[in-house]
Image: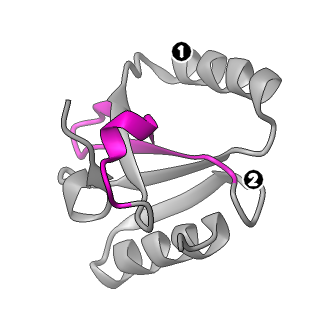
Amino acid sequence: MRITSDLYVSQLLRRLFSDGGFAAVERRGAEAAGAIFVVVRGRGGAVQLYGPAVQSMSGEREEGRRFMREAAGDDAALSARFEREARFDPDFWVVEIETDAPERYIEIAEG
């Protein structure tokens, strides 16, 4: 059984904060099963976007959450991406983290 989106985000933030990092919830979605998008800002200002991995990429691990990298562009492109997502699914989360090693905090799907 998969943990709720709310609990997953809380754990993600706690792990970042305990490592001395920064994270913020930019958009709060459905507590139980809202999709989670993670915006990663590196120290040099580079932006990466990770969204939920498609089921075929998530393999047999249904209890975990896996993410796949998406095109990020700049802040305006991210805003446009999230506006489109809101029309499709208004219950999604956006969490922004600052790290140069997102793989330490989120499981990234291969492919």
Q: Which residues are magenta?
A: 34-61
110 above or below 31? Answer: above
- Callout 2 amino acid: Gly
Residue 91, visible in the rendered structure: yes
Q: Which mark's residue is nearer the viewer, 1 or 2?
A: 2
Q: Secondary structure at mark 2?
A: loop
> Residue 36's spot in the image, x, y percent?
56, 49
For this orientation, the residue located farthest to the front is 60
Give the residue at the far bottom of this rendering: 18
Q: Where's the C terminus, which quadrant?
A: top left
Mark 2, residue position: 29
Residue 73, picture quadrant: top left
Precedes in sequence: disc 1 or disc 2: 2
Image x and y of residue 20, in percent = 30, 77
Which label is found at residue 109?
none
| x 18%, y 54%: residue | 101
At a point 35% along the width and 46% down the height, the residue shown is 58
The residue tagged 1 is: 77
Type of amino acid at the residue the image marks with label 1 = Ala
